[in-house]
Amino acid sequence: MPYPRMLRIRQHFPAEQVEDIPAEVERQLSRLALGEKVRAGETVAITVGSRGIANIAVITKAIVDHVKSLGGTPFLVPAMGSHGGGTAEGQRGLIEGYGVTEEFTGAEIRASMETVVVETTPQGIPVHFDKRAWEADHVIVSGRVKPHTGFVGEIESGLHKMMLIGLGKHAGAKIYHRAINDFSFLEIIQAVANAVIERCNILAGVAIVENAYDDTALIEAVAPAQFFDREVELLKLAKQWLPRLPLNEIDLLIVDRIGKDISGTGLDTNIVGRKYAMHRATDRDEVNCKRIFVRGLTEKTKGNGTGIGLTEFTVQRAVDQIDRHVMQTNCITGGHPEGAMIPCVYDTDREAIAAAVSTLGLTELEDSRIVQITDTLDLAELLVSESCLPEIEAQPDIEIIAPPGEMVFDDTGNLTDV
């Protein structure tokens, strides 16, 4: 059976970038004159999330250093809902895997799954808040602003979500995801955020926006009273800077790896076009990937294969990487058990590709529109099949860096990574 020939391309995206991250964090936090609120010896909890945010260790250390310069005593709080298997040890391990260690940052990590209920929203929802952060004199909420993989609105993923899901821990994440069945995401997030800002000594926010190359494009310190308005504007920027696949119509998308460090859904639904429905694009999606084949998991996801259920095909070696307890805890907490479902499993990449294309009607394998990517964060350099060449050549921001060549399988019938 002839497989399509593949060519290597490079996409050129806008590339805003922060050159000196510690200096920018210091400049931004200094604008807020936090020394007027932080007294010598007072404790300041600083949030650290579970996503693979670029330069997160450097950013966190810079926040720690600023707090110390004010005479405060900073400590770090893993803020990630149910991730890390819903355990304090698992969550501590996640942030340490990103280089956010006590040794590097100079701040103690206080990981706990305990929460206190600080308020009840007008909808009757209890507001959970990390106990260690609650005990602090002040809290700095640090997080990346980006499009959410499941919700659409003025506020999606960012400082508000950190206050809601991150600092709500497993208990908060469970109740908020259940509440989404009865109330809109925006209703919940505004009600909970208002309670947290009013009751939980929120000192400041540090909002991070990344460019299409998965690097730090913008860092902005935000006063609590401005969280909503600024996050609305920063989300618009984040959407503009989001990377994209080179084609809107794809027969088969091959993804080398998925993971929670890549996206909340393992692979970003804003990129692959499955934000609104399982296994298909809707008229609100920009991209239509008819079939998706996942080849593996990232090391940093620690066995959390969340999102593999969004795809149709995988291989046994990817399934073997999954920690079912970690994955299922995360998906059940999020009210999305489908994300943990295992797709069709094959022994080799060769078999999986042939099977996937065989489900696409009269499309012949050698003529199919195939795209292979590393993951949904890294879309600068990728492979596309030869049938896509006319469309690729018509795009001025795409460079062909290797001509069409045979799809190469090793002796075991597997591809190499992009």
Image: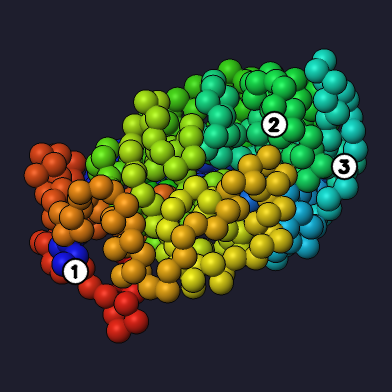
Considering the image in quadrants, where does the N terminus appear?
bottom left
**Which residue carries the number 2 mark?**
204
Q: Position of residue 131 (x, y in %)?
A: 88, 43
User: Relative to residue 51, is residue 370 drawn left or right?
Assistant: left
- Which residue sits at x=81%, y=48%? 73
- Tell me the amino acid under the disc marked 3: Thr
Taking depth in this image into account, of 288 and 64 the one nearest to the observer is: 288
User: Relative to residue 139, is residue 2 drawn left or right?
Assistant: left
Task: Quote the CA–CA distance across marks 1 and 3.
Answer: 57 Å
Label 1 secondary element: loop
- Tell me the amino acid under the disc marked 2: Ala
**Which residue carries the number 1 mark?**
1
- Which residue sits at x=51%, y=63%? 298
Q: Is residue 237 visible?
A: yes
How many numbered marks are there? 3
Q: Is residue 402 visible?
A: no
